């Protein structure tokens, strides 16, 4: 099973990713978490490169992200399957992921899009206490989602990879909808 899980801030990507990774025993690669861990480590070059973007709620440049994902997808422990959480987020990242998967002779199973209205993104993000959850940063992340990530969904829809689920339901219902649509 090789999945990408997409959605705006507060859509429930993290929660659903954990559940799916437990269910299928696959490795979770959550780019936002990897970046936050790097930020906390003052000696991390990745943390230094990414800090200003993550703290402001802007997208980290594609070149940095593509390199990071390549590093993780070429590790042995992901050989039996993986889930990318919060990646890709731009059309360029989506294309580069395809090139990488071609190189690795792997094929994506599905791209899951957890859809929620902006008001839900805002409300859920405001109740968390992450360093990049300040009101300004949250608004920028919502804007980045609309400007950069949403147009990318067509890329997966056109190629029949996209599953849309209603993320405003309860956690268990969202999970049930994902499993049903994955036909497992
Ligand atoms: P997340 O936890 O997925 O909401 O990501 C938190 C932050 O990490 C984002 O606001 C971006 O600054 C950065 N980030 C995570 N994934 C990506 C990505 N695929 N492309 C660019 N920036 C990313």
Image (cartoon, rainbow, N blue to C red):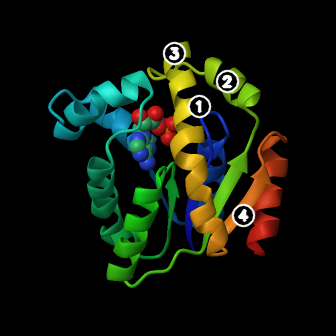
For label 4, the SS is strand
The local crowd at label 1, few if under 14, some if 14 to 19, many if 20 or more residues have their Cα within 10 Å, is: many
| First along the sequence among labels 4 and 3 | 3
Vertical placement of 100 versus 46: above or below?
below
| Disc on the earlier residue, 4 or 2 | 2
Question: Residue 145's spot in the image, x, y percent?
Answer: 56, 39
Mark nearer the viewer, 1 or 2: 1
- Whole-number angstrom distance, CA of label 4 to CA of label 3: 30 Å
**Element under label 1?**
helix
Tell me if the residue at label 1 has its CB under 8 Å from ligand 1: no
Say the numbered circle drawn on residue 142. Answer: 1
**Res. 122 mark:** 2
From the image, tell me which residue sits under label 4.
Answer: 163
Q: Tell me the quadrant of ligand 1.
A: top left
Give me the C-alpha separation between circle 3 and circle 1: 10 Å
Q: Are marks 1 and 2 in contact (CB under 8 Å)?
A: yes
Labelled pair 3, 1 in contact (Cβ < 8 Å): no
Residue shown at the point (32%, 72%) measured from the top left: 76
Q: In x, y percent, where is residue 110? A: 62, 70
Question: Residue 8 appears in which quarter of the rendering?
Answer: top right
Q: Count residues near mark 4 (Cα–Cα under 10 Å), then give few for <14, some for 14-19, many for 20+.
A: some
Q: Mark 1 or mark 2, which has the lower sequence index?
A: 2
Q: Assign the C terminus to one quadrant of the image.
A: bottom right
Among numbered discs 4 and 1, the one appearing first in the sequence: 1
**Mark 4 → mark 1, Cα distance in angstroms:** 21 Å
Foreground of the two, 119 or 126: 119
């Amino acid at each position: 099973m090789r999945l990408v899980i997409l959605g705006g801030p507060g859509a429930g990507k993290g929660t659903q990713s954990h559940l799916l990774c437990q269910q299928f025993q696959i490795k979770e690669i959550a780019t936002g978490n990897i970046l936050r861990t790097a930020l906390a480590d003052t000696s991390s070059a990745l943390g230094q490169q990414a800090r200003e973007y993550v703290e402001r709620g802007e997208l980290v440049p594609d070149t940095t992200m593509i390199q990071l994902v390549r590093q993780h997808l070429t590790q042995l422990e992901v050989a039996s399957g993986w889930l990318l959480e919060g990646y890709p987020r731009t059309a360029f990242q989506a294309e580069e992921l395809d090139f990488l998967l071609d190189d690795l002779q792997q094929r994506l199973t599905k791209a899951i899009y957890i859809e929620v209205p902006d008001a839900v993104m805002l409300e859920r993000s405001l109740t968390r206490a992450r360093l990049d959850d300040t009101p300004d940063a949250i608004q920028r992340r919502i804007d980045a989602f609309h400007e950069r990530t949403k147009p990318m969904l067509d890329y997966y829809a056109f190629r029949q990879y996209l599953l849309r689920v209603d993320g405003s339901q309860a956690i268990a219902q969202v999970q049930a909808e994902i499993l049903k649509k994955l036909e497992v």
